Image (tube, helix red, strand yellow):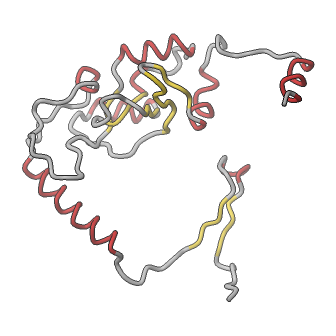
Amino acid sequence: PHQPLDRCVRLLPHVSHTGGFFVAVLQKTHASDTDLKEARKRKLREEYYARVPQDLPSGDASSAGAASTDVPTTVPMNLSSSEHFVLVPTEIMDHIRRFYGIDESICNEQFCCRASDHRMQSIHMVSAEVSAMMRANPKLRVLAVGTRVLQLHSERNYRWTQEGIDVLWQALDGSRFVSLTEACLRLVLEAP
């Protein structure tokens, strides 16, 4: 049967800088199997972190790329011992900055990755204020932050994500920009 959509809202992409989508309020009537599994995982996680020493590495650049030796080796299944975000090491950000020509208006400390992601497959960008808060509170465990701007493509080679281009294009020095004439653009667009 057809249900009326009078309690549904359509968000337009040009207003919120996203793809068009609908939002509706749904009421959950009972817990699913997934909910029960998540509750068990959450309980295991809480029990585990209650046993972990509170003086784990703070997430500074020196500990971001290497596994911590202070973390106990008995991590419960499906749990990461370091799900929080840490700053990306300076040498990696300097390499990315040189390659893409990111100007100095964006500081290295604004880029972070998950501590458990030792290959740093996804790099996120945060505001200067969030970066300052993360550095001022080293024991703070940030679980979700910023916009994913770079994705690892191959060893030490990163590609922009779509969100990353939107966030950082104004901070690029132009060394990676390509200028096309109208004739050249037509040729590219008309090619099979």
Q: Residue at x 19, y 52 (%)?
A: 77
Residue lying at the far right of the rendered structure: 183
In the displayed structure image, the side of residue 166 where residue 57 appears, left or right: left
Q: Residue at x 12, y 37 (%)?
A: 71
Depth check: 137 or 182 in front?
182
Depth check: 159 or 128 in front?
159
- Quarter of the figure with residue 142: top left
Q: How many circles with numbers are drawn on the protein? A: 0
In the displayed structure image, the side of residue 147 where residue 109 appears, left or right: left
Residue lying at the far bottom of the rendered structure: 1
The percent position of residue 89, horizontal first and vertical second, equals 33, 20
The percent position of residue 128, horizontal first and vertical second, equals 44, 29
The percent position of residue 40, horizontal first and vertical second, equals 21, 66
- Quarter of the figure with residue 55: top left
The percent position of residue 56, horizontal first and vertical second, equals 14, 35
Q: Quadrant of the C terminus?
A: top right
Depth check: 103 or 98 in front?
98
Q: Quadrant of the N terminus?
A: bottom right
Q: Residue at x 78, y 15 (%)?
A: 179
Q: Residue at x 23, y 40 (%)?
A: 82
Depth check: 185 or 142 in front?
185
